[in-house]
Image (cartoon, grey):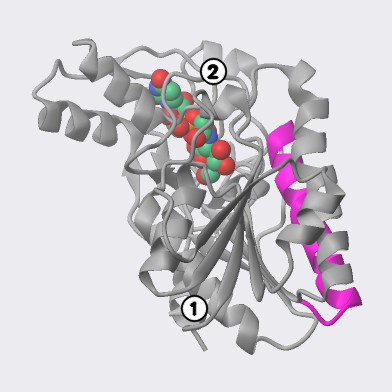
Amino acid sequence: MTRGTTLLVTGGAGFIGSHVVEAALARGWRVRVVDSLRADVHGDGTMRVPAQEGLELVVADLADEAAVAGALEGVDVVAHLAAKVGLGVDFADAADYVTSNVTATATLLQAMRVARVRRLVLASSMVVYGEGAYRDAQGPIAVPPRLPADLEAGRFEPVSPRTGEPVEPLLVEESAPSDPRNVYAASKLAQEHLAAAWARGGDGTAALLRFHNVYGPHMPMGTPYAGVASIFRSSLERGEAPRVFEDGGQRRDFVHVRDVADANLAAAAWTAEADAGAARAFNVGSGTVHTIGEMATALADAFGGPPPVVTGDYRLGDVRHVTASSQRAADELG
Ligand code: UD1
């Protein structure tokens, strides 16, 4: 079924989207991109993947219903990656997150219903889980957000609300309850719920991919939405030490963008085989956990730059540890 597939990639000019486009073209799929080429994200307003046979670009915002309807013609499956990403600068961003992520997804899904396009791969995020998964001496336990007073005093590790002892971080499974703790996280969870409602109501199939911390070539730099790997790299390029927040012991799973692109294609194939009405979440990580301190040291060593500085600074919205189990994706998507 793979050859001959026509894939629509929303946000196909973006960091992850452009790698999905390249991976799909390499498999011989036809690819159509819808991207707004928003100046605050794309600067020069161009697409990175060069024009070629099998690739079409539609420059449009997803709010443009006529453009989206046109772009869906002849499409088998949609990979919906267009989104406003990152933690945001402040709450004044909230309406833009909702317009860009929630309303735009609803508009896209309505258009897919009309066009009878029944297969969706959605770019969601590990942030839907909030603070990761933990265990104390008595078993699994949910921990509340960390208190500013604790962070200020350098008490970064969450403690069990029932024993008062530090908790042990676990790998989060898809069955974990959602606990979105910022506007972006809330918008990603809303996208998942819309996709599930769309699938149930119209014999659609939706793969909800919860990406972990994605890194790799062409990751955003120098914007408020840049991830830590990109920030550290920019520091090293300026000859400065990476500045590690908290005590550097916070844990993440860094996954390469080409692996994430492959996960999108595997999920696209899954949508052809899944039961009508199915919407299923899959964590997408590398399966390997590292601390931010370890990552900073590895980057500084590779760069031959100054060693990292642990600053003790903190960001109130940050979770301490969040690490995925990507076992379901391995088992069910291959
Ligand atoms: C990231 C993504 C988010 C995605 C989520 C999925 C970004 C900006 N955020 O969130 O969109 O949904 O992964 O898991 O890409 N840190 C430093 N020094 C710095 C900057 C950050 O030590 O200069 C630390 C932070 O305190 C945090 C860790 O690095 O502990 C990761 O921060 P960040 O890259 O912003 O990613 P997440 O918050 O994990």
Q: Quadrant of residue 111?
A: bottom right
Q: Which residue position is annotated with label 2?
A: 151
Q: Nearer the viewer, residue 313 or 104?
A: 104
Amino acid at circle 1: Leu
| Residue drawn at x 36%, y 29% as measured from the top left | 230
Please state the extent of the stretch shown in magenta in the rendering: 181-204
In the rendered structure, which disc, 2 or 1, sits on the residue that comes first in sequence?
Answer: 2
Q: Quadrant of residue 215?
A: top left
Q: Nearer the viewer, mark 2 or mark 1?
A: 1
Q: Quadrant of residue 198?
A: bottom right
On screen, residue 22 versus residue 204, left or right, reads left
The label shown at residue 333 is 1
Q: State the image coordinates of residue 222 (x, y, percent, origin top left).
A: 43, 19
Q: State the image coordinates of residue 35 (x, y, percent, origin top left).
A: 63, 44
Q: Nearer the viewer, residue 280 or 176?
A: 280
How many marks overall? 2
